[in-house]
Image (spheres, rainbow, N blue to C red):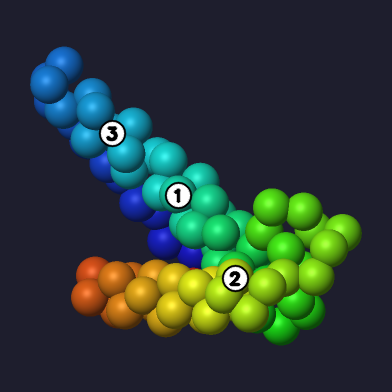
Amino acid sequence: MGKIIIEFDSIEESHDARVALDAMKWKMAIWDLDQKLRSITKYGASLTNPSQEATSEEVDIADKMRDELREILTGYGLNLED
């Protein structure tokens, strides 16, 4: 397996270092959001109260939000399947 070395030369670049190091956390947060939306569209679990059934409006919005999320990720050359 290869090695990746990320170097940052100044205090100003420390924010960039933190962003680079937190990339997997960001991916997992987006994954969790996608899975929450999936549970609404696939299983009909309400967003506000998972023990109740989702309304048709919740399902429609969750479906549209999943599509929008995927469009945004695609625009950045990303996907959740990698």
* Left or right: 23 as drawn, with respect to 58: left
Question: Vertically, is 42 above or below 25?
Answer: below
Q: Where residue 5 appears, x then y in whole percent? A: 31, 44
For the point 42% across and 61% down, which residue is it?
A: 2
For the point 87% across and 59% down, which residue is it?
A: 51
The dot on residue 26 is 1
9 and 12: which one is in front? 12
Residue 58 in view: yes
- Amino acid at dot 2: Glu
The nearer-to-camera label among 1 and 2 is: 2
Separation of marks 1 and 2 at Cα, in angstroms: 25 Å
User: Regarding mark 1 in the picture, which secondary structure is present there?
Assistant: helix
Q: Earlier in the sequence, mark 3 or mark 1?
A: 3
Separation of marks 3 and 1 at Cα, in angstroms: 14 Å
Q: Determine whether label 3 and label 1 are within 8 Å by CB.
A: no
Separation of marks 3 and 2 at Cα, in angstroms: 38 Å
Check disc 3 and report the residue beneath it: 17
The dot on residue 58 is 2
User: Regarding mark 3 in the picture, which secondary structure is present there?
Assistant: helix
- Amino acid at dot 1: Trp
